[in-house]
Amino acid sequence: MLSQLNAAALRGVDALKVEVETNAASGLPSFTVVGLPDSAIRESRERIMTALQNSGLKVPPRKITVNLAPADIRKEGSAFDLPIAIGLLGSIGILDAGLQDTLVLGELALDGTVRKIYGALPAGIMAAQEGLRRIILPACNAREAAVAIAAMRKAEKITVHGVATLTEAVSLLKEHRSRPSVSVEIRDLFRHTADYPVDFSDIRGQQTAKKALEIAAAGGHNMIMIGPPGSGKTLLAKALPGIMPPLGFEEALETTKIYSVSNLLPPEKPLLTERPFRSPHHTTSNVALIGGGTNARPGEVSLAHNGVLFLDELPEFSRNALEVLRQPLEDREVTVSRISATTRYPAGFMLVAAMNPSPAGALTDEDGNLTATPQQIRRYLSKISGPLLDRIDIHIDVPKVDNRELFSTTQGEPSATVRSRVMQARAIQQERFMNDGHQGVFTNAEMPPGLIRRYCGLDDSCRKRLMEAMERLQLSARAHDRILKVSRTIADLDGGGAITLAHLVQAIQYRNLDREFWNF
């Protein structure tokens, strides 16, 4: 008898419907899985047969053939265990053989327990798009799938059921009466206040750096901080997510999909409502940073989508690892090409980098002498290429904190106050772009050249000052555009009027590291 139901295969951060066809025929007993399965699926025979036996479900000797269609798309992972087991029970008459409206996912333990899978959120979205009526998956993934159904506004049409064991799944499918399904209320997931580890009020001194962070958050600009060890660069970076606008629902859904397919979604959070902060070690490989690999997975740049990617000790990263950042910084996505397929991962992150001015740490000692030779400093700084530096909008110096500020009892501005100004500036930008029909642009940092010319107009005095700065600092055309974007953001924080000379000069000052360090 032929049994049919549905499973899901992941492609990037999306899911594709896979039809699981199971046929049990008379003949020499065998168990064959076709349809480009990977080794985890080919090994599922032992897990499935043992789980069925330990669950008290007897399968008579049959020639069993399982087809995963479409057959030209490679299927990966252990989430096919439960659908193959259910299909097998349907093909021998224990369950209904017609489950074409049902999506089943789950890994089986030998005792019949249904284990957690990854990618439940995109699988739920796919089920809603394909018009399926029921989803059965591990209990620990049920709320995640329910978020997808709520996001697609199909809660009244699709039921989500979480099961803990194979026996429970069989009982669910045998019942003809409806069983209460799992559901979530999206508004409830956003009601709790985001808890970021560092508040702006916790940081002593560094007013210049704090202002630069505010500008970066308001316009979505990339930023690099240079200063001696212990000056607070890491603390400043960790405070950045707390002054960024709260995640919107669409942003939260995009971010959660990435964490879902990466198997990094916390069980208690079916939807991520806080902006991610990723801080990979400088020994991170190119693949771990950018994504890909034999079984393609999102890298750190995608895990930081809609959040912050913090690269501490920037020159300690390999030159190749830093150069692969150039494409996602421009395109806000990563393209991973393999022989079998080309996969795209979103990578709309804010890059925040930190580094020492010298390989010895501080640039000078207590007597004002260089801590390393000019050649050593030049070699240390040359690890960061000019094209990568051009893609970083704001460069700031973070000096050592004065002891008087360190022991001061004066409380600084909290993150909530700074965030309110950032949100006002973001609102100005979004209204500007939406009113002119630019739906794909949300921040000043995302403006293409045409919008830069339109929204970053300068008067004669500003044009003259910018030309002088470009000649003095030997800036590239890309750096020219970055200065205009930062100027626009500073003006938006000042109410959204025209760019003035004061706004432009402040933006130019954020490129002073081009002269002071990279031309050392």
Image (cartoon, helix red, strand yellow):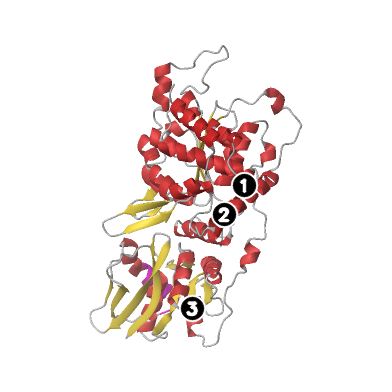
Image coords of residue 254 (percent x, y): 50, 59
In the rendered image, residue 53 lying in the magenta stretch gets the answer: yes
Image coords of residue 508 (percent x, y): 53, 32
In front: label 3 or label 1:
1
Residue at the spot of label 2? 432
Q: Where 81 falls versus 56 (above or below)?
A: above
For the residues labelled 2 and 3, say whether their Cβ atoms are less than 8 Å apart: no
- Left or right position of 388 against 191: left
Mark 3: which amino acid? Arg
Image coords of residue 321 (percent x, y): 38, 39
Query: Which numbered dot is residue 134?
Result: 3
In three-dimensional space, the C-alpha distance between marks 2 and 1, rounded to whole angstroms, equals 10 Å
Residue furthest front as drawn: 460
Q: Where 371 falls versus 413 (above or below)?
A: above
Q: Earlier in the sequence, mark 2 or mark 3?
A: 3
Mark 2: which amino acid? Arg
Residue at the spot of label 1? 496
Label count reads 3
- Left or right position of 4 against 354: left
Q: Which residues are magenta?
A: 47-57
Please name whichever residue, 447 or 513, is drawn nearer the observer in this view of the structure: 447
SS for dot 2: helix
Q: Residues within 10 Å of mark 2 (few under 14, many from 20)?
A: some
SS for dot 1: loop
